[in-house]
Amino acid sequence: MNVSINQLVKSLLQKDSLEHCSLPELTAYAERNPYFGAAQLLLAKKLQTESPEKFEEQYQKTLLYFHNPLWVEHLLNETGGAEVQEVGGSGLEVGG
């Protein structure tokens, strides 16, 4: 699971990870804090796995709260985990 998402969960909801949060709990939190981008992000992440048919609408709403849509994409899809590995001394290769 995404470390950044779990840090948000710990800070905001005092739970260890997003798996420990229920969808109704996150929905209620986002509704109580409609202008809080982090709440919308957590709800989008939960919907992504538990209710994909509702994810797209929440994803579009979440993007309204952030200036960098690529960062939101990174948080939701856990992209960017590539590392550089040396290959036989002849050059560098990117692995993932």
Image (cartoon, helix red, strand yellow):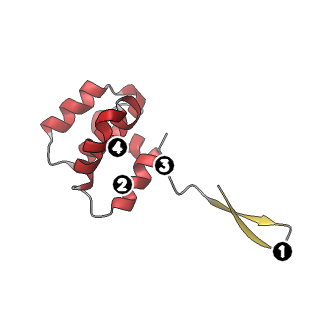
Q: CA distance from mark 3 to mark 4?
A: 15 Å
What's the residue at 27%, 64% (across, down)? 67
The percent coordinates of residue 11 (x first, y second) are 32, 41
| Residue bearing mark 4 | 8
- The reply to whether discs 1 and 2 touch (Cβ–Cβ < 8 Å) is no
Q: Is residue 34 left or right of residue 52?
A: left
The secondary element bearing badge 2 is classed as: helix
**Looking at the image, is mark 1 or mark 2 earlier in the sequence?**
2
**Looking at the image, is mark 2 or mark 3 earlier in the sequence?**
2
The amino acid type, in three-letter code, at marker 2 is Val
Residue 87, above or below 39: below
The secondary element bearing badge 3 is classed as: loop
Camera-nearest label, 3 or 4 = 3
Camera-nearest label, 1 or 4 = 1
Q: Residue furthest front?
A: 53
The secondary element bearing badge 4 is classed as: helix
Q: CA distance from mark 4 to mark 2?
A: 13 Å
Residue 86, above or below 16: below
Nearest the viewer among 46 and 55 is: 55
| Residue bearing mark 1 | 90
| Residue bearing mark 3 | 78
Q: Is residue 48 left or right of residue 84?
A: left
Q: Residue furthest right?
A: 88
Q: CA distance from mark 1 to mark 2?
A: 36 Å
